[in-house]
């Protein structure tokens, strides 16, 4: 089963300093038919204007991954972590028992990121924080596993049983994915266009993938995408 989610039909929150497309019910967007996809609870495609950002606010019992697409994001939290993340970097935070943090764009240019919230396997787990900068070559015309569970092989490990992959394919390049039984995928077309088993995805589109054993991804243009693989719900 392949279900395309057109970017034009996603909720757009426009606060002036922040423009955000919500893939799932979040903040002022309330939709009981679109709460989550398995353990994926939130996926926001954010554009943050220069010299603005999110002031310090709390999180708990959520695993949060930020994938920086363009620009720079400065993170500061109550665990004494502070750093500026640049394009290609991934930041993660498992806010188990509770964490306060802020996210600011301290540059003069707009920045874009995907913010992904994963429901943890248990409540009140120990808090985790970290980041990693991946090179462009690591995802050029191949899949790069940026996040895995603690048992996985990715540089970034969280508690939940998920794998997050990214890739940048040149036009007409392709990748085949073998999806195991009882697993599912949420696919995000970050930039460019792809053909997924005969269905075209363009900039900002997404797709729910279930009950498919083979997924063929063909780049119709230069294609930048991310997907989250998890247990089937």
Image (cartoon, grey):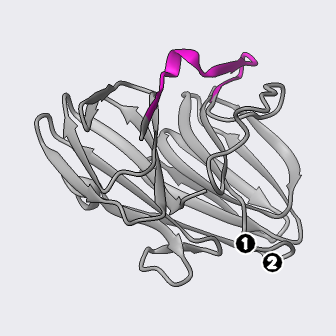
Question: Depth check: 149 or 176 in front?
Answer: 176
| Furthest-left residue in this view | 172
Residue at the spot x=71%, y=22% of the render? 17
Looking at the picture, how far across and down is residue 80, in whole percent? Answer: 79, 70
Left or right: residue 2 versus residue 66 is left
Looking at the picture, how far across and down is residue 65, in whole percent? Answer: 61, 56
Vertical placement of residue 36 versus 222, above or below: below
Q: Residue beneath label 1, please?
A: 121
Residue 30 occupies which quadrant of the picture?
A: top right
Residue at the spot x=16%, y=40% of the render? 170
Q: Is residue 4 magenta?
A: yes
Q: Taking the image as drawn, is residue 28 in sight?
A: yes
Q: Are marks 2 and 1 in contact (CB under 8 Å)?
A: yes
Residue 78 occupies which quadrant of the picture?
A: bottom right
Image mark for residue 125: 2
Secondary structure at numbered mark 2: loop
How crowded pointer 1 is (Cα within 10 Å; few <14, some 14-19, many 20+) is rated as some
Looking at the picture, how far across and down is residue 168, in whole percent? Answer: 27, 45
Report the quarter where the C terminus lies: bottom right
Q: Is residue 163 magenta?
A: no
Q: Taking the image as drawn, is residue 193 in sight?
A: no
Report the quarter where the N terminus lies: top left
Marks 2 and 1: which is nearer the front?
1
Give the number of marks: 2
Vertical placement of residue 162 versus 172, above or below: below
Question: Depth check: 19 or 217 in front?
Answer: 217
Left or right: residue 203 versus residue 106 is left
Question: Depth check: 26 or 95 in front?
Answer: 26
Residue span colored magenta:
3-21
Secondary structure at numbered mark 1: loop
């Amino acid at each position: 089963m392949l279900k395309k989610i057109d970017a034009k039909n996603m909720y757009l929150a426009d606060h002036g300093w922040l423009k955000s497309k919500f893939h799932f019910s979040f903040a002022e967007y309330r939709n009981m038919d679109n709460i989550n996809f398995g353990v994926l609870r939130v996926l926001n495609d954010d554009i943050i204007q220069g010299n603005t950002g999110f002031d310090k606010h709390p999180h708990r019992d959520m695993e949060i991954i930020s994938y920086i697409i363009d620009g720079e994001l400065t993170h500061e939290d109550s665990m004494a972590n502070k750093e500026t993340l640049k394009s290609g970097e991934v930041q993660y935070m498992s806010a188990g028992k509770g964490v306060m943090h802020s996210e600011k764009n301290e540059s003069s240019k707009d920045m874009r990121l995907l913010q992904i919230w994963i429901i943890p396997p248990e409540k009140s787990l120990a808090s985790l924080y970290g980041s990693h900068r991946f090179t462009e070559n690591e995802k050029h015309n191949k899949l790069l596993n940026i996040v895995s569970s603690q048992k996985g092989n990715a540089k970034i490990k969280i508690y939940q049983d998920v794998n997050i992959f990214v890739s940048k394919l040149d036009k007409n390049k392709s990748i085949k994915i073998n999806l195991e039984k009882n697993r599912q995928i949420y696919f995000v077309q970050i930039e460019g266009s792809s053909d997924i088993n005969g269905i075209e995805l363009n900039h900002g589109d997404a797709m729910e993938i279930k009950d498919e054993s083979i997924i063929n991804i063909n780049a119709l243009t230069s294609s930048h995408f991310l997907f989250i693989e998890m247990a089937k719900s």
